[in-house]
Amino acid sequence: MMNPRLQHQLDFLRAVDALKGIKRQTLIATGERQETDAEHSWHVALMAWVLGEYSKAKIDLFKVVIMLLIHDLVEIIAGDTYFYQTKERKLAKAREQAAAAKIFSLLPFDQAQILKRFWEEFEERKTPEAKFAAAMDRVQPIINNFLTGGKSWREHNVTSTMVLEKCRHIKNGAPLLWEYIQQLIQEAVEQGMLPA
Amino acid sequence: MMNPRLQHQLDFLRAVDALKGIKRQTLIATGERQETDAEHSWHVALMAWVLGEYSKAKIDLFKVVIMLLIHDLVEIIAGDTYFYQTKERKLAKAREQAAAAKIFSLLPFDQAQILKRFWEEFEERKTPEAKFAAAMDRVQPIINNFLTGGKSWREHNVTSTMVLEKCRHIKNGAPLLWEYIQQLIQEAVEQGMLPA
């Protein structure tokens, strides 16, 4: 009875509701609880609109926003792997590739292709859009970790060297924001939130 | 030391984190808990991209997505007023106007003007973008209420007549989706999720 194209679209929209059930290591700014992947995705998408002018290169901001809305969907199937667990992150890659194929293929073929390409582009971090989106994806948790006294950093034995190393690519997307983030990390170290 | 424009933008991005702390009456699809405003905003923004082709009129989809990312920010200050409480909704209007002035003015003037206008446009529901965005804002909770057995409808003594009446404007934004939603409401009545 229902348009089969609409049926696929609604199946996808129902499946992605599960992003609300995935907890991140980062806390919401009040420190009360961990934020969910859906909340993080909302925050970075809005952040991209607000901070778009700091992109190093000219970007299609709409594409960046959509990229950020979908960048964590693979975690619905592959789960969240903590960013600073380098070994686990490598193993997660293959799982996430398979997850992307699965989750996006719920959509009609044309839309599945677009979102899967956006996700791959985001992961490869080569285009101006992907570099800026990746910067947003790193800036947001650093700010929230700072706002919550570095609790999540300390719980996971993260050091400032690790943050600087894993997040330096912010510079490739948004150099001025990288200046600011470096200052914030230094302040976090001085305030004892983050071991040097 | 820091660029004052960037300082304003970061103040705004920090303040809006509070959207993660506002619980809605709608449950997440597993039924485990209420969803937050930030999660809802993420879901409807992505929904707009996926279902954009069903808009009655030609729309600027980027504008719709940004509108939906910010449409509930006023609730950070004004609080969430349940959609079916008509009297309370009217009182909430003035509170939300004041809240919009306050929350958006954290941003640099140019950006504050843009987002405040987007929010007013959304509320007025006159432009094709606002009509489609408003449709998304209604379709998502109806689907989630259906997926969770109508628990939230029954808890608030909502009837199918009320849903049909308050949500008929979906037709103005996306006629085909309104057809689908009417079928879903009928199914909800037949399954005893929603009193006629």
Image: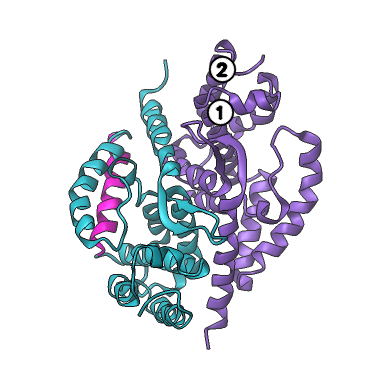
Chain colours: A purple, B cyan
- Residue A94, given in percent of the width and then of the height, sits at 80, 51
- Residue A167, given in percent of the width and then of the height, sits at 64, 30
Region rendered in magenta:
B109-125
Residue placed most toward the observer, B19 or A46? B19
Q: Is residue B83 above or below residue B107?
A: below
Q: Which residue is mark 1?
A: A145
Is B118 part of what is drawn in magenta? yes
- Residue under the point 59% across and 25% down: A151
Dot 2 lies on which element? helix
Q: Residue furthest top?
A: A190
Q: Which residue is mark 2?
A: A188
- Which of the 4 image quadrants contains residue B67? bottom left
Q: Residue furthest bottom?
A: A1
Counting the numbered discs, the total is 2
At label 2, the amino acid type is Ala
- Residue A85, given in percent of the width and then of the height, sits at 75, 34
Question: Which part of the image, by quadrant, shows the C terminus of chain A?
Answer: top right
